[in-house]
Image: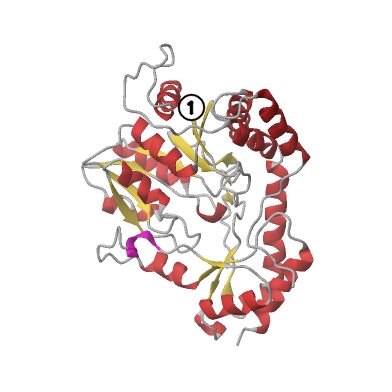
Amino acid sequence: MKMIPIAEPWLGEEELTNVTEAVKSGWISSKGRFILDFEKEFARYCRVRHGVATANGTVALHLALVALGIGRGDEVIVPTLSFIATANAVTYTGAKPVFIDSHPDYWCIDHQKIQQSMTPRTKAIIPVHLYGHPCDMDAIMDIARQHNLYVIEDAAEAHGAKYKDKTVGSFGHVGCFSFYGNKIITTGEGGLCLTNDDQLAEKMRTLRDHGMDPNKRYWHDMVGFNYRMTNMQAAVGLAQSKKLDKFIEKKREIAGWYAEGLKDLAERGFVKLHPEMPWAESVYWMYSILIEDSFGMQKDELMLRLAEGGMETRSVFYPIHIMPPYEAGEKFPVAEGISRRGLSLPSGVKLTRSEIEQVCERIAVNAK
């Protein structure tokens, strides 16, 4: 039986050529031309002045928070429905993540609930462009301006997604990306911070390299980190970034195939399709659906049925507030409902229409 994977990278000759050049040059660690070229190319794509490459997406978030001065005693607004790295990066600084429920229409942070959770200790907001769908950035930026807050966009799952024709990661003080192997473009492991602030970019570059003075080698003015990307990773990333538009086109095509294949189930109230708001251009990192109670089968059982057919799926993230490190008895019903019913389907850019149709058919035959 051929497996239909949830995601897999699309690597080709361009990536191999770049990595070979990096290896032959001898510059395989955190020096080499591909790092700077990748930073410039990805920043250019997002129409932002500076890109600061990092070892992964989690440390990109931590680096941004530290560079902005977030620390012990501070509070940072985060959505509870996200991968746990969003909250962990805040915790690493000594600050406290303050959780916000999801918007019922598009699953990202509900901006209407942010201000009621703010205190004098609130210093920043981290909107997460969940599963490739943008947050309502106008509303979030308005709140940040009113209360003099930093905005750090977690765009780990949303490379190239657009809010009102502007690319995510370019709205806040810093935009953070992940290039893990299942992301839309990959460097294997890797991350990147975007910013239009010259001084902030320089501070992040210094902090990611042990806090070393860029003009006085082995002199350290601050406690920094080893958060650098390698030249070989950047070699892959540079080739991948030039294919990003092609990958996004395929992601949106896959979303269209799912919408068509599951249309009948949606109209009958058995499933809810992955949303896209009129002001958004989602990149559908993981095409995800909600299994309604009327479906007649619990989500976990449906996942087992799909797995029996060679179709890999995964649950939508658990809300962070229900997990042991952050559990405090809070209730966020929208996020909890999305997580309980949410199912991510095979979404890799190598998938064919026939494979998507097989997944849709397998879901349909299990409906009540």
Q: Can residue 71 be found in the magenta stretch?
A: no
Three-letter code, disc 1: Asn
Q: Is residue 145 above or below residue 98?
A: above
Q: How many marks?
A: 1
Q: Is residue 173 left or right of residue 21?
A: left
Q: Is residue 138 left or right of residue 367?
A: left
Helix, strand or loop at mark 1:
loop
Q: Where on the picture, by quarter, is residue 237?
A: top right
Q: Residue at x 49, y 73 (%)?
A: 341
**Residue 270 image offset from top left, x and y in percent:** 58, 79
Q: Residue at x 48, y 43 (%)?
A: 57
In this picture the colour scheme is secondary structure
Q: Is residue 112 left or right of residue 131?
A: left
Secondary structure character of the magenta stretch overall: helix
Magenta stretch, residue numbers:
319-323
**Residue 284 image offset from top left, x and y in percent:** 61, 55
- Between 22 and 146, the one lying in front of the other is 22
Q: Residue at x 33, y 61 (%)?
A: 321
Q: Is residue 40 visible?
A: yes
| Quarter of the C terminus within the rendering | bottom right
Q: Is residue 78 above or below residue 166?
A: below
**Residue 129 image offset from top left, x and y in percent:** 50, 50
Q: Is residue 69 above or below residue 128?
A: above
Q: Is residue 270 visible?
A: no
Instruction: From the image, tell me which residue sits under label 1.
Output: 196
